[in-house]
Image (tube, coloured by chain):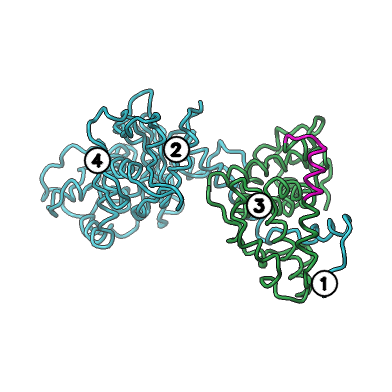
Chain colours: A cyan, B green
Amino acid sequence: MTLPPLDDDALDQLVRDARPVASDDFEARVFAAAGAGSRRRAVASAAAVLVLAAAAVVAIVVRRSPEPTPHAAGRSPEAAASPAVGPTVSGLAEGSAASRPPPATVTWDDPGRLLAQALAPDRATLEACFKTHASRTVKVRVYMPPDGAPASAFPGPRASVLGHRPLTDEEACVDRILSRTAPPALPSSIRAVAVELVLAPDAPPAPSPWSSEMAYADERGPAMRVWSDPARYVAGLLASSFTPKPSRPPSTALRCLASRGAAEPRLGPPHDDQDITVVVRGRKLHYVASSQPRVFDHCLEVMVAMCRALPLPPGSLEFELRFSVVPGGAGGSREPRGNRDHSVNPF
Amino acid sequence: MDLRPEQLLHARRGDRAALAALVRHYRHRVMAVCVALAGPDGEDCAQDALVKVLRAVHKFDPARPPSLDAWVMAITRRVCIDRARAARVTRHADLDVDRLATVGDGPVPTRARDAAVRRAVLALPDEQRAVVALRMWGELAYDEIAELERVPIGTVRSRLARAREALRSALSALDPHAAPRTTPTADAATSNDHLSTGGTR
């Protein structure tokens, strides 16, 4: 049986009847995406964000101190005195501060501890924010921009977009305290960092940070190693070759930055005026184009999006990194190729 | 369900219920156009397009052209084409058209016929497919399609005419009782990876 010959109207009706339709939950997903996107923008407008949860901090500590010495798990005296405020994993374990050597100067290798130190004078006020729910454990994701005061990641009062709510009194209290905290400046290659603080006045002590580190090292060895230096790892990924399409020869994302016939450039530590920014979210990489489009922006958007990273450390959501472009030939040798070559060090 | 003028006004002011009505009003059209233009990424594109619509609706001026329909479809088209270009290797053969729901979602022979029609639409060359999608699934007028595609209105008509001929040819041997993948148009669906590369097979 075949269809009778179709005139234009009948054919049009046939095509209209075959129109695909959205699923039942499509509307909900649109609104969820609208809300999530606006939250991301709100955070990004405050500062470019590297979200590094406590496990990533642990990874950095492990990289710096491969031997599990007591000092590796050292804490600041302020933090040791009060375990109520601290980052989830890297944080402030129980134990005698007197039995440990004096802690070295805390650096951005351990953002959690840095924030805990910066918040130490306000710890009592922070706990007071949650007095009405003293037994409740509250996790606060705190973003620290390159300079300026940290900010919490509560639903933003500035956002009037779909899916947002104003801050509760407790959240506003935490936000107020964070806004007057002044941790030291970030290293130049990291745009911002976020750690998770746990406010749990009545909670049992956190596990030893060193045992957490070892567990993490056992389970996620390769990922831990690469994410101990996010800038180096991502730069290596962008310099690694891959095949964007079966019919094309292997290429690298950095080819987008090369002039015709010139050697492939390299990525280096950021400068003031010629940096490119890459966000790692999940396993995907995203190039952040500048507000004034450049000739290589679209190429980089496409090529960077084709790169895949190893999974982020547990609890991490995003890294935002920036690099400068070193013209090809300036450094002498070309970078080695291959996606599996994570030993590339462009710095 | 039609979108009432006062709902558009409220939507422009950010009223949640009015925005929801806006999404409900356009979701099927946007989804259909995205499936036609972006293939397997159609659903993601439709979501992105409507998110952009929600974020920009406050800037829409109903007193000036384009119409709201054309404005929404312009955003949809741009999002889908950008996505298809970024994906580089879009293969519409990956899209399981048999599983896409349709307005009627009727008995099996009807669903098989609808799937065959969709495959035939997806097998059209880029330019014809865009015109068919915008006209029949996006419900735009000829002049609005001409504006979107940046071609004369006569070109829109001729593309539509050629598309109708191709569809008529593809569907002439359609057996509504046959399994969708055994219909003659299935061949077209498995060889239509030219869709994102500008081919005119």
Q: Chain of mark 2?
A: A
Horizontally, residue A140 falls left or right of residue B7, namely left
Q: Chain of mark 4?
A: A
Could you classify mark 1 by the number of other residues whose Cα lies within 10 Å: few (under 14), some (14-19), or many (20 or more)? few
Horizontally, residue A217 falls left or right of residue B103, namely left
* Part of the protein shown in magenta: B150-162
Tag 1 or tag 4, which sits nearer the N-term?
1
Q: Which mark is residue A345?
A: 4
Task: Please identify, in this view, whether the residue under mark 4 or under mark 3 is nearer the observer.
Answer: 3
Report helix, strand or loop for mark 2.
helix
Q: Which mark is residue B201?
A: 3
Report helix, strand or loop for mark 3.
loop
Q: Main SS of the magenta segment? A: helix
For this rendering, which residue is in front, B177 or A317? B177
Task: Please identify, in this view, whether the residue under mark 3 or under mark 1 is nearer the observer.
Answer: 3
Residue where numbered disc 2 is placed: A300
Residue B25: % across, % down = 77, 50
Query: What's under tag 4, amino acid-wise?
Result: Asn
Residue where numbered disc 1 is placed: A2
Give the CA distance from mark 2 to mark 4. Answer: 20 Å
Query: What's under tag 2, amino acid-wise?
Result: Leu
Query: What's under tag 1, amino acid-wise?
Result: Thr
Residue B105, relative to residue B167: is it above or below? below
Tag 1 or tag 2, which sits nearer the N-term?
1
Task: Please identify, in this view, whether the residue under mark 4 or under mark 1 is nearer the observer.
Answer: 1
Residue A97: % across, % down = 16, 48
